Amino acid sequence: MFELESSEVSQETAGSAWLPTASRRTFLKGVAGAGAAVSFMSKSAWANGEIGFWAKDLPADKLTEMFNTIVRIRWHERTMVDKMITDPKYRGYNHFYAGQEAVATGVCAALNNKGPFDQLDLVYSTHRPTGHAIAKGVDMKKMAAENDFRATGLNGGYGGEMHLSDKSCGFIGADGMIGPGHVIATGSAFAFRARDSKQVAVVFGGDGTYATPHFHSALNNAALLKLPFIYVLENNLYHQYAHYSYSCPMKDIADAARTYRIPGVVVDGQDVFQVYNVMKTAVDRARAGDGPTLIEAKTYRYYNHWGAPGAEAGQLGAFGYDPLAISSFRPEREVRAWMQRDPVDICRNILVNWGVLTRARADEIEAAAKKEAIDAFAWADKQPFCKPEDGLKNVFVEGVVPARQFG
């Protein structure tokens, strides 16, 4: 077991992302001495150019699948943005995930996403769920229909974006509230431990969750009971329209892990392979019974908090005035600087460099992902709407339900 040497923290030129630095000498020295048994504590992420120790050894088809997932998320988001801007009849809405694709992809690539339910790793999401859902294996067509409240949608059209759920792949659901998902996820982790399962419970949260009691309650209980629980905090710098520094006194939220004496890791959320590396280590640790991990992925969303204000059809990203914020709350230069470290480009360039893909093959994969997204929304457009008279259909249990104390 080893830890990286202490290192100074350097500021990324792209936006305000703060990431730890670690020398290649230290990295190689540690790997040589530890083999596959790797431990990591706060500020021990392999970031700022360290390509990684797990991801580089993955087979070509797994690496290609990760690129495919990233571009599928990207084109789902872009297609939905264009739909919202150009189609006045479209009823769907979204908290867009574009810019953060590497986080969901790297996290879910390290999980069990297929098989019987009692073998699946479970993911709990946020009000920004579509990227997590696609990465976990949710059907894009059914999700497109659900987001437009169609009767053949993922959840019958009754949930919409902030309540997406698909038990078949272990995507337990999105949550419109900030925080409760963390507590529910620790409940699943407790169940896994109680029945000696090797499953892992993962919850995604934003930087704003640090200020909620659920954040600390979940980590405290997971640490006390050594639960197989992983908290993935996507720090995209803003909770709605305020910079995260307004509610968090720390530069790295992962430092909060020290309070609970569990690993707290900062990782470059724009690089899918670095995300995969730290997630793989956290998953192995959880399955081994060593307890929870807090992962803070520094990332950035290309669109505003909700919907498509400031966006134009056919253009990636939103710029300028946001009427919901009554201001332009993010400097345009900041948005464009982060877009220079685009997760799609980073993933593509690394795989081309490794000889896994040619640029022509990468372009083919992306074109297929774009077509899939367009076809998914076209299919959803033809589906029937929910019936108003069925509005309470899934609110109350139908039939006779015996009292638990007698049944």
Image: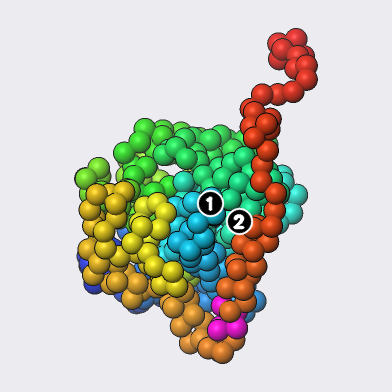
Please tell me in which quadrant of the rendered image residue 399 appears: top right
Residue 285: image location, x then y, percent: 52, 53
On the question of residue 73 being in view, the answer is: no
Which residue is found at the position 52% from the left and 76% from the top?
A: 56
Task: Decide: few, some or many residues near mark 1? Use Cα within 10 Å; few <14, some 14-19, many ≥20.
Answer: some
Residue 387 horizontal/vertical position (percent): 68, 38
Q: Residue at x 72, y 46 (%)?
A: 117
The image shows residue 75, relative to residue 206, as above or below, that is below
Query: Is 248 included in the stretch rendered in magenta?
Result: no
Neighbour tally class for label 2: few under 14, some 14-19, many 20 plus, Cα within 10 Å: many
What's the residue type where badge 2 is placed?
A: Ala
* Dot 1 and dot 2 residues touching (CB under 8 Å): yes
Q: Classify mark 1: helix, strand or loop.
A: loop
x 45%, y 73%: residue: 314
Q: How is the image coloured?
A: rainbow
Q: Quadrant of the N terminus?
A: bottom left
* Residue wearing tag 1: 92
Magenta residues span: 362-366
Q: Residue furthest top?
A: 406
Can you identify the residue that label 2 sits on? 144
107 shown above or below 222: below
Q: CA distance from mark 1 to mark 2?
A: 8 Å
Q: Earlier in the sequence, mark 1 or mark 2?
A: 1
